[in-house]
Image: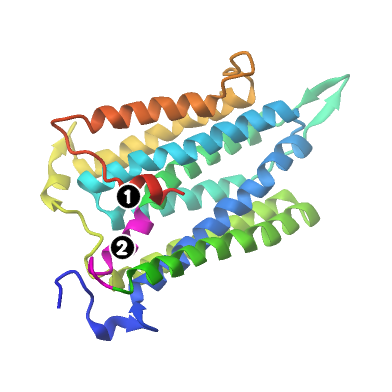
Amino acid sequence: MSATALPARDDFLGHPKGVYVCFFTEMWERFSFYGMKALLLLYLTKYHLFGDKAGLDLLGAYGGLVYCVPVIGGLLADRWLGMRKAVVFGGILLVLGHVGMAFEGHAAARVAGVVVRDTASLGVTYLSLALIIMGVGFLKPNISTIVGKLYAPDDPRRDSGFSLFYAGINLGALFASLVCGFLGEAYGWRYGFGAAGIGMLLGLGMFLWGQKYLHGHAEPAQPALLRQRVAGLPREWAIYLAAVLGVLPVAWLMWAAANGAFSLGGEISLALLLMLVVLGGVLLCGSPGSPAPSARRCSASR
């Protein structure tokens, strides 16, 4: 038996139990992601009275970063952190972000023709979106990679295992729009965003409970590197600290996008600029003389 294959007794319905752990983790993560996204534009335009352009600018910046940052999260997991640690850290950030989105504050109002908004509530919203972006960056590219690690390279069940995993993504997305959208419109934004947060909490709980079924397939390739000190901290904690501090500039970018700071003639979106910057950085990191990020990261964030 291949060293990378799990023992037969660990199977359930023909697949490693770890696949089902990833299935439910990703299902709930996608439930929270699409549930929040379904409400975000309406929340900005109806509750905080943003114009359509400002709301779409923010949504575009958010969408661009959500698809760029996973490249960095995958790179960090490949080189140092390991997939399991990256998923747990990303899940924690996601839970915090979705909980923050449930804080709706006071509705905006027009006073003498001027829109007066709850700036504290909006600040929480920008920070929460930044936490979600960073959390997706660590979780999304690595959870799908774990699925591949649970099978031997020549295992005929591999394709059906990925099909099962992606079914969880579709299932989470389907129920997200129905549940979160309904709760947000019918009972209040906090209930829709809160439902998304509960979904992410369930996903994180599932992964923490089921990580024993991964049997070491998602651990760091060189654990000793995580103990090396960087700027006075073990490398692992330096990565966590850098990611948490990175939430602040991302939150500022959310504010800037909503306030039109990056509208370059209305033709070039902030999302496109961010994609170019991030992808350029990744290409530099993957230049000759340094390990290139795994190609599987490009497809893992879809």
Q: Position of residue 201 (x, y in %)?
A: 50, 60
Identity of the residue drawn at 42% across and 26% down: 276
Residue position marked by numbered label 2 in the rendering:
148
> Which residue lies at the image location 64% right of the left edge and 45% below the top edge?
103
Residue at position x 64%, y 63% in the image: 175
Quick one: 275 or 138, which is closer to the camera?
Answer: 275
The amino acid at mark 1 is Arg
Quarter of the rendering containing residue 234? top left
Residue 253 among magenta residues: no
In this figure, which residue is indicated by the disc labeled 1?
A: 296
Mark 2: which secondary structure?
Answer: helix
**Contact check, label 1 and label 2, Cβ < 8 Å:** yes
Answer whether residue 273 is visible to the viewer in this image: yes
Magenta segment includes 145: yes
Residue lying at 57% horizontally and 45% vertically, measured from the top left: 100
Report the number of discs.
2
| Magenta-highlighted residues | 142-155
Image quadrant where residue 280 sits: top left
The vertical placement of 280 against 179, above or below, is: above
Quarter of the figure that contains the N terminus: bottom left
